[in-house]
C-alpha cells in the first residue's frame, strides 16, 4: 500500500511540474465543452469556436469526437467549477480569469488521476508477469519518464486515458487467466468499452486483447460472457450518440466531414487520401513522427527480444507478439489518414498506444537480463535509456506548436533536432530571427505554468517559479524513496512466479 501511495504522490508531483496552465490542446478544450453540454446544457460547441464542429441535426454543431473523455472530464469539471467559481468571486476574479483557473484545475486533477492509474496499473501488469517489485516499479517509472507518456501527461489529449484503460484491461485479463472469475472479464470489457467510446479505432486494441485472452484461456465462453455485454452496450451508446448528433446509425464522422469540409478538387474520400506507403513508412522513419525516434525504448525492446527471445516465458512472448501485431494494425489503419501523425503532437499520436505498451517491458527485460549482456551492450542500452529520458523531458519544455510552425517555414531537419536547437537558442537568449519571428512569446519560453504566469500575473510568477524549482529539486528524492520501498518489498516477498528471462 505504501508503494502505491508513493506512486500517487509522484503523479501529483509530476503533474504539478508539467502543467502548462491549461489543457494543452484545443481537442481537449472541445471535449470539455461536451462535458458541460452534458452537465449544464451548454452548446456542444462554443459559439466562439467556428472550427470546432460539424453541422448535425437541426443545424446544431457537434464535435466529431467520441464521448469517452468528456465523460471522464465531467466529475473533475464539476468539482473544479464548484470550488473555483465560489472562491474566484471572493478574490475578485472576472469570468474569463475564473474560466482559465477552472481549466487549469481540470487539467491537473484529471491528468494526475490518469497518471496515477497508469503508474499503478503498469506496475501491476509487470508483477503479473513475474517481475519483482523493484523491477516492476522501475518499469513503471521508465514508462512515465522515458517514453512519450510524459508529453501526454502534460497535454490532456486522449492518449493518457487510452493507455490507462488498456493497462486496466490487460491487468484484468491477467487476473482472469489466473482465477477464471467472470468479474475480471467484466472489468476488462468495461475498460475496453470506455476506450471505444473515447476513440472508435480502439476497437483494434479491444480485438487484440480479446484474442490474447481467448488464446490463453481454457474458459473462453465464460470470458466472452463477461467481456462482451459492456462492449455491446458501449457500441450501442456510440451509435445512439452518432444518431443524436448527425442522424445516422451506421456512419462515422469521416463521411460527414468529407461531405462538409472537402476542399475543392480533393478526392471524395480525402480523409484517407494520404499515400499509404508514405504514411506507413513515415510513422517508422520520418524525422518528424518516427516511433523509433520518439520512443527509443522500442528499439531497446527489439534488441532485448532478439538477444533473449528463446529464454522468455511463453506467456510473455504471446503478449509481445499481440502487441507487435497491434502496432502493425495501427500503422496500416492510419497510414492513409490525411492528417499525418496527428499534426501538432509529439510523435505520431495515432499509433503511440501500442508502442508505449511495448516500451513498458523494455526496462524490466533489461534489468532481468542485465548481467548476461556484454559490457558494450549494457553501456549502449543504458545510454539509449538515458537519452530517451532527456528527450522526453525536453518534449515538455516548450510548446510542440513551435516545431510545427518552423517545419512549415523550411526547417525540415526533424522535430527532435529542431527542439534541441530551439532549447539551446532560448537558453542562450540568441534566438535566430528566421526561426522565431511572429511566434507568440508563450511558445518560445518554458511551457510550465509558473513561467507562463509571468505574462499574466508577474507579481505571482516569482513565488510560483521558486515553488516549481523546489518541487523539481525534490523529485529525485521522491523517486529514490519509491525505488527504496520497491526494494524493501522485493526483499520481503518472492515473486509469484519464476523470475523472467534469466540466463542460467
Image: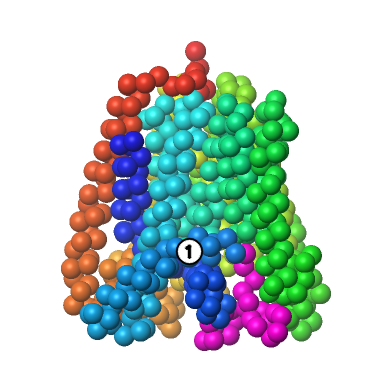
| Residue drawn where x is 70% and y is 44% of the image | 228
Q: Secondary structure at mark 1?
A: helix
The region drawn magenta spans 45-66
- Left or right: residue 348 versus residue 455 is right
How many marks are shown on the rendered structure?
1
* 165 up-or-down from 69: above or below: above
Q: Quadrant of residue 458?
A: bottom left
The reply to whether the magenta stretch includes residue 494 is no
Of residues 36 and 482, the one nearer the viewer is 36
| Residue drawn where x is 44% and y is 63% of the image | 75
Mark 1 is surrounded, within 10 Å at the Cα level, by few (under 14), some (14 to 19) or many (20 or more) other residues, namely many
Q: Quadrant of residue 137?
A: top left
Residue behind mark 1: 73
Q: Position of residue 475 (x, y in %)?
A: 27, 49
Can see residue 143? yes
| Residue drawn where x is 33% and y is 76% of the image | 85
The reply to whether the magenta stretch includes residue 52 is yes
* 223 up-or-down from 418: above or below: above
Q: Position of residue 126 (x, y in %)?
A: 48, 33
> Quadrant of the image for the N terminus?
top left
State the predominant SS element of the stretch in magenta.
Answer: loop
Of residues 10 and 452, the one nearer the viewer is 10
| Residue drawn where x is 36% and y is 50% of the image | 11
Q: Position of residue 411 (x, y in %)?
A: 52, 70
Of residues 368 and 278, the one nearer the viewer is 368
Q: Position of residue 93 (x, y in %)?
A: 28, 82
Q: Residue furthest right?
A: 268
Can see residue 365? no
- Left or right: residue 459 versus residue 278 is left
Amino acid at each position: 500500500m505504501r508503494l502505491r501511495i508513493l506512486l500517487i504522490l509522484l503523479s501529483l508531483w509530476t503533474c504539478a511540474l508539467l502543467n502548462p496552465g491549461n489543457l494543452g490542446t484545443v481537442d481537449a478544450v472541445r471535449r470539455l465543452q461536451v462535458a458541460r453540454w452534458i452537465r449544464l446544457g451548454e452548446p456542444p460547441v462554443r459559439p466562439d469556436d467556428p472550427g470546432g464542429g460539424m453541422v448535425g441535426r437541426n443545424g446544431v454543431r457537434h464535435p466529431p469526437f467520441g464521448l469517452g473523455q468528456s465523460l471522464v472530464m465531467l466529475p473533475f469539471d464539476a468539482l473544479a467549477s464548484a470550488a473555483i467559481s465560489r472562491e474566484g468571486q471572493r478574490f475578485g476574479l472576472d469570468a474569463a480569469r475564473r474560466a482559465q483557473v477552472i481549466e487549469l484545475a481540470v487539467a491537473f486533477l484529471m491528468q494526475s488521476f490518469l497518471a496515477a492509474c497508469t503508474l499503478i496499473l503498469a506496475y501491476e501488469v509487470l508483477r503479473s508477469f513475474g517481475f519483482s517489485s523493484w523491477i516492476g516499479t522501475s518499469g513503471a517509472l521508465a514508462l512515465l519518464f522515458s517514453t512519450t507518456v510524459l508529453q501526454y501527461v502534460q497535454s490532456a489529449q486522449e492518449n493518457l486515458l487510452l493507455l490507462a484503460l488498456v493497462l486496466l484491461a490487460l491487468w484484468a485479463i491477467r487476473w482472469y487467466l489466473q482465477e477464471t472469475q467472470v468479474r475480471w472479464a467484466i472489468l476488462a470489457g468495461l475498460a475496453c468499452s470506455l476506450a471505444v467510446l473515447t476513440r472508435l479505432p480502439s476497437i483494434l486494441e479491444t480485438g487484440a486483447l480479446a484474442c490474447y485472452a481467448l488464446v490463453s484461456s481454457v474458459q473462453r465462453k465464460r470470458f466472452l460472457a463477461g467481456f462482451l455485454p459492456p462492449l455491446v452496450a458501449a457500441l450501442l451508446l456510440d451509435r445512439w450518440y452518432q444518431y443524436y448528433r448527425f442522424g445516422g446509425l451506421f456512419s462515422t464522422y469521416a463521411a460527414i466531414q468529407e461531405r462538409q469540409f472537402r476542399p475543392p478538387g480533393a478526392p471524395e474520400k480525402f480523409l484517407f487520401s494520404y499515400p499509404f506507403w508514405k504514411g506507413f513508412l513515415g510513422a517508422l522513419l520520418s524525422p518528424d513522427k518516427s516511433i523509433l525516434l520518439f520512443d527509443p525504448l522500442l528499439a531497446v525492446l527489439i534488441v532485448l527480444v532478439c538477444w533473449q527471445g528463446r529464454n522468455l516465458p511463453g506467456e510473455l512472448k504471446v503478449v509481445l507478439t499481440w502487441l507487435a501485431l497491434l502496432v502493425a494494425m495501427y500503422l496500416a489503419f492510419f497510414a492513409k489518414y490525411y492528417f499525418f501523425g496527428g499534426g501538432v503532437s509529439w510523435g505520431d499520436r495515432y499509433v503511440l498506444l501500442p508502442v508505449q505498451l511495448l516500451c513498458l517491458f523494455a526496462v524490466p527485460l533489461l534489468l532481468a537480463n542485465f548481467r548476461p549482456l556484454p559490457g558494450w551492450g549494457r553501456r549502449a542500452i543504458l545510454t539509449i535509456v538515458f537519452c530517451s529520458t532527456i528527450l522526453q523531458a525536453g518534449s515538455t519544455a516548450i510548446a510542440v506548436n513551435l516545431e510545427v510552425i518552423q517545419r512549415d517555414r523550411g526547417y525540415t531537419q526533424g522535430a527532435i533536432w529542431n527542439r534541441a536547437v530551439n532549447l539551446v537558442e532560448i537558453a542562450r537568449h540568441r534566438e535566430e530571427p528566421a526561426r522565431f519571428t511572429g511566434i507568440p512569446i508563450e511558445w518560445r519560453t518554458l511551457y510550465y505554468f509558473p513561467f507562463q504566469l509571468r505574462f499574466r500575473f508577474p507579481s505571482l510568477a516569482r513565488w510560483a517559479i521558486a515553488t516549481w524549482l523546489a518541487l523539481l529539486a525534490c523529485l529525485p528524492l521522491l523517486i529514490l524513496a519509491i525505488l527504496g520501498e520497491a526494494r524493501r518489498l522485493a526483499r520481503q516477498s518472492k515473486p509469484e512466479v519464476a523470475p523472467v528471462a534469466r540466463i542460467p
